[in-house]
Amino acid sequence: MNYHIVTYGCQMNVHESEKIAGLLRGAGYTRESAIEDADIVVFNTCCIRENAENHAFGNIGALKKLKRQRKGMLIAVGGCMAQEEGKAALLVKKFPFIDIVFGTHNVAELPALIERKRREKKVVSLLADRAQTEDGAQPYRTSYPNAWVNITYGCNNFCTYCIVPYVRGREKSRSARNILEEVRALVQAGYREITLLGQNVNSYRDGEVRFPALLDAVASVEGNFRVRFMTSHPKDFSAELVSVMKRHDKICNLLHLPAQSGSDRILSLMNRRYTREQYLEKIAMLRSAIPEAEVTTDLIVGFPTETEEDFEATLSLVREADFSSAFTFIYSPRTGTKAAGMEGQIPEEVSKERIARLIAQVNENTRAKSERYVGRTIELLCEDYDEKKGLYLGRELLGRMGYFASGENCVGEFIRMRVTRANGVSLYGERL
Ligand code: 5AD
Ligand code: SF4
């Protein structure tokens, strides 16, 4: 018996799919890379924007024919879209060939649901929220030399555009002891980069242990590895955290700090609980302590009532904050969120025109920053081999991707590269 997992969405979902793979392997399944040859196909879905849902709908629909040819094939749909209010019912109605639907809070139950499916025609199992933070799943990792480690689940922030708090439940922190045990084991197993994951890592709390203390403890684990963390909410990003970042060479001086908008009026409508000025102050605080620190961000255009002036404030924020790169999104109304019911929804043509201008501004910044790398020597953690380019690739401490030729396989090694050329966000060079 074998499995094939299709993953949509963020890092959190990618890691969750590693856990699903671990659970299926525990139940005796092996990995199958061709979807048409799989005995069980698992869709791990995302619902953050409408296009994420449309992708999943399209690809699930495409399995109808396959399923007719291979009667024994099981199709399971889980993740954020499955957890969304009313979506499970819609999924099984639209795609009657789905066998199992599971949510974000009962991933660990999947092997049991597969068993149940042997006796029942269809199994739909969703929980209202997570009962505990330890799901007992041993992830089957395919991301060497990087390893993701969850530190929190869920979110309490209720930004008015965002569906995450509804599908991922209330914020819960894992115990610091469990996190540290996992990190130690990963480092011992040879992983070279640990990324701590949470919707808002800065609000981590296990009794007296807050995020800066946890990060300090993780970076104090013996061994040759790097530490990253994401995502940080600007309102909770603190001086204490900056001092921990400064203290440890192992912690990457790269901060992903979603700004969402540069306009105070829009930030307030989004319920972000900071102003443009406060956001810029947080970055200034980081850069005054660690001058080389890089900041990346998420930006949304076309939030309800966004005027040209509001949008220009976002454009100017990109210049002022000097982001090294940014994920840019067109606002997508999500049923059940506060913003979906707001007046002043922005026509798509306007949003499209704005996002094109925003991307051009972000790219200009990224390019200018990349150019400054030419001639420098950087240290990369080699992550993979790019077949198409015939080059190895790795990331430097500040998050930039570098490509180089190497006679020997060096995945998992720290290597030094002299940068000879920059192309957009990527750097090219010679291995030293
Ligand atoms: N529409 C567009 N973008 C969104 N994001 C979250 N919800 C929405 C939405 N409804 C973006 C935010 C967040 C990132 C993960 O996705 O920028 O930081
Ligand atoms: Fe969504 Fe805001 Fe929570 Fe991020 S902090 S997951 S944007 S509600």
Image: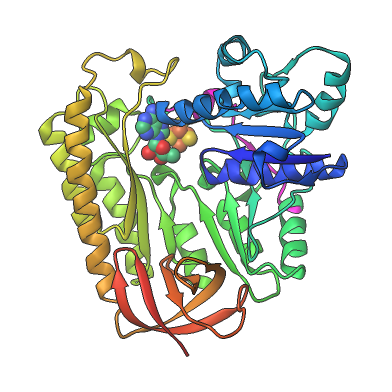
Q: Does residue 172 show up magenta in the picture? A: yes
Left or right placement of residue 355 versus residue 382 in this view: left
Q: Is residue 367 visible?
A: yes
Q: Is residue 416 above or below residue 137?
A: below
Q: Which of 69 and 117 is in front in this view?
A: 69
Residue displayed at 24% across by 43% down: 276
Q: Is residue 303 above or below residue 212?
A: above
Position of residue 3 measured from the top left corner of the image (x, y, whole percent): 75, 40
Position of residue 10 measured from the top left corner of the image (x, y, whole percent): 52, 42
Q: Of all residues shown, which one is farthest toward the bottom? A: 432
Residue displayed at 38% across by 24% down: 160
Q: Pick the quarter of the image with the N terminus.
A: top right
Q: Does residue 110 show up magenta in the picture? A: no
Q: Quadrant of residue 306?
A: top left
Q: Is residue 83 above or below residue 43?
A: above
Ligand 2: which quarter?
Answer: top left
Residue displayed at 19% across by 51% down: 360
The magenta segment: 162-177
Colouring: rainbow
Q: Is residue 223 above or below residue 350?
A: below
Q: Is residue 206 visible?
A: no
Q: Nearer the viewer, residue 169 or 406?
A: 406
Residue displayed at 50% across by 76% down: 380
Q: Which of 292 and 365 is in front in this view?
A: 365
Position of residue 135 measured from the top left corner of the image (x, y, whole percent): 77, 38
Q: Nearer the viewer, residue 267 or 85?
A: 85
Position of residue 184 measured from the top left corner of the image (x, y, whole percent): 75, 64
Left or right placement of residue 170 versus residue 336 in this view: right
Q: Quadrant of residue 325?
A: bottom left
Left or right placement of residue 292 versus residue 184 in this view: left
Q: Of all residues shown, which one is farthest toward the left? A: 309
